[in-house]
Amino acid sequence: MHKFRLLDALNAPEEDMDSPSDNQRAPLPCPSDVLYTPPNPDGSNKKCGNCVMYATGRGQCYIHEPALSIRPTSVCGYHVFCFAPMRMFTSVVSMQALTPEQSGLIQTEDGTSCSSCKYFAKDPREQGGECMAVIDPSSLPAFVEEKGCCARWTLGAPSLSEMLDESMEEEEEEEDLDEDEDLADDEAGY
Ligand code: SF4
Ligand code: SF4
């Protein structure tokens, strides 16, 4: 009898023995748990080039090692928007600088926002949509703004609505080209 129990245990799927049960799994975080910030006032993406801790002259960040050269299109989890970053720091206090691993510093094409995140599902009627990575007080996907962002940002494929917009633009361009060609044919007397 004991032998069969042992065999059962050995043959059991791995998750039955080692993985956490449902009530041990941590729930998804709410937006403030992952440092969600609302859109920049000028509608730009979050990036070092519009962060209060950036010095544009040498590509330095106040909270990282001064020797670290950072592009204006990079960003980290400590981003704080400002309209006009300074060119040079006028003074620097003695502090323990963060490493890129600690701050989550990454290089991007042109900064980050929910609209380019793989967890974002745009609502075509709103300037935002649902995020599959954070929940609201009812434990449903939280509503986030297109140009908001958080520490869980992960580059994703363009959303369905963006792809639809692009294909409509392409169709319009093709129609314009056809009309131009018809006009040229008419003028040439074909
Ligand atoms: S690395 Fe982070 S804190 Fe530093 S300038 Fe860039 S966004 Fe701001
Ligand atoms: S869509 Fe991405 S960046 Fe925006 S809140 Fe969700 S996880 Fe964060």
Image: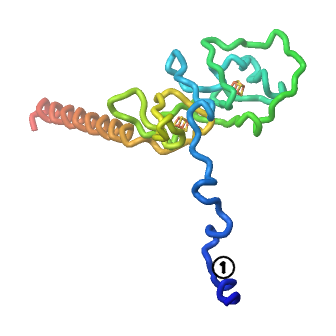
Q: Quadrant of residue 172?
A: top left
Quadrant for the N terminus, please.
bottom right
- Label 1: which secondary element: helix
* Rendered-image quarter of ligand 2: top right
Residue displayed at 61% across by 60% down: 21
Whether residue 176 is situated above or below residue 17 in the rendered picture: above
| Residue 16: quadrant of the picture | bottom right
Residue 64 shown left or right of residue 14 in the figure? right
- 162 over 71 or under it: above or below: below
Q: Which of 24 and 64 lies nearest the eye of the viewer?
A: 24
181 relative to 155 in the view: left or right:
left
Quadrant, the C terminus: top left
Q: Position of residue 76 (x, y in %)?
A: 68, 31
Residue nearer the viewer, 175 or 8: 8
Label 1: which residue? 9
Locate residue 147, reporting x and y percent. Answer: 50, 27
Establish whether ligand 2 lies closer than 8 Å to the Cβ of label 1: no
Which amino acid does the dot numbered 1 rest on? Ala
Residue at 73 percent across and 34 percent down: it is 103
Residue 183 position in % (x across, y down): 15, 31
Q: Using the image as rendered, state which of residue 169 and residue 154 is in the foreground.
A: 154
Crowdedness near tag 1: few (<14), some (14–19) or many (≥20) residues, C-alpha within 10 Å: few
